[in-house]
Amino acid sequence: MLRANAIRLIMERRWHWWGITIALCVGLLAAACGGSDPPAAASEPAAAPAAQPAAGQPTPTPTPPPDPAALLVETAENLRQAQSFNFVVEHEAGSIYVSTVQAKATVAKGGWNAEQGAQMTVDAYLVSGPDAPTEDGTYVELRMAVTPDSYFLTDPLSGYWTKRPFSSISIPITELNDIVAVAADSIDNPVLAGEEEIDGKSAYKITGDAPATVMDWLLLFPVEGQRVDVEVWTDTEEKILRQARIIGPIGEFDDADTVRKVTVSDYNATVEIEIPGPDDYLDLSNIQQ
């Protein structure tokens, strides 16, 4: 009993600081070949002229490339229609620094289900300040689960599950599909940059830029007027987001070379949201904010 009261007292003092860390999500994004000329080939008979359309037949019209702006609109709409998916947000360079708890987050991964809610695991490091490298910090794993009427978060030091006030959720993670769709809608100056394969699927690559405020739900406190470069890969057949990269700093603590990558998979597949059992968490949901 004394141990349980001690755990409760510690968590009540620090739980509101750690609530903000869920936003560490839940969250972005060739040289020409040279060489000497080959020897001249031996002369060959002249090639036959290319076949011409038969008399009276129209000349085929080449299919124009898709409009990148229209692709983004369709991708955003399909995101809004999605019922579930899995996601990974990772940093190719940099991290997300949260000053209130002096932590840097590098990876967030989880799943979302329109009916059940969402769950996420965050890799973070407790550091001495924004300039301290993550490798000098102390690794902590944060886990969260959100259902339509409950919110669970692990204590970063003990790893024990706690139930928090539902109103204290920092971001609308249960509406994750719409959040990502808004980001796709906010890309300016889109350019079609070709086709690439992402996770075994053919995808159009679209480049552009966007205001950093498109990520303000992550509580990164974007610098006013800051813009970032964006790369988006949308499936050539289904027009669904496969991957995105957000290149450049967003918040005041971001490194200049920060690059965030978001990968989305398993659209409309079975994504189960797991929450702790009634005996596996400490109930702090009645604490006043």
Image: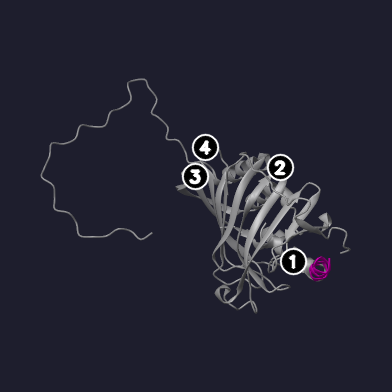
Front of the two marks 4 and 1: 1
Disc nearer the start of the sequence (3/1): 1
Q: Is residue 181 left or right of residue 289?
A: left
Q: Secondary structure at mark 4?
A: loop
**Residue 59 appears in the figure:** yes
Disc on res. 203: 3
Indicate left or right for 31 with 128 as reference.
left
The mark closer to the camera, 3 or 1, is 1
Q: Residue 114's mark?
A: 2
281 in the magenta segment: no
Residue type at the position of mark 2? Ala
Determine whether label 3 and label 1 are within 8 Å by CB: no
Tell me the residue that label 4 is attached to: 237
Position of residue 251 measured from the top left corner of the image (x, y, whole percent): 66, 69
Q: What is the C-alpha distance between the residues marked 1 and 2?
A: 25 Å
Disc on the earlier residue, 2 or 4: 2
Q: Position of residue 139 (x, y in %)?
A: 61, 69
Q: Nearer the viewer, mark 2 or mark 3?
A: 2
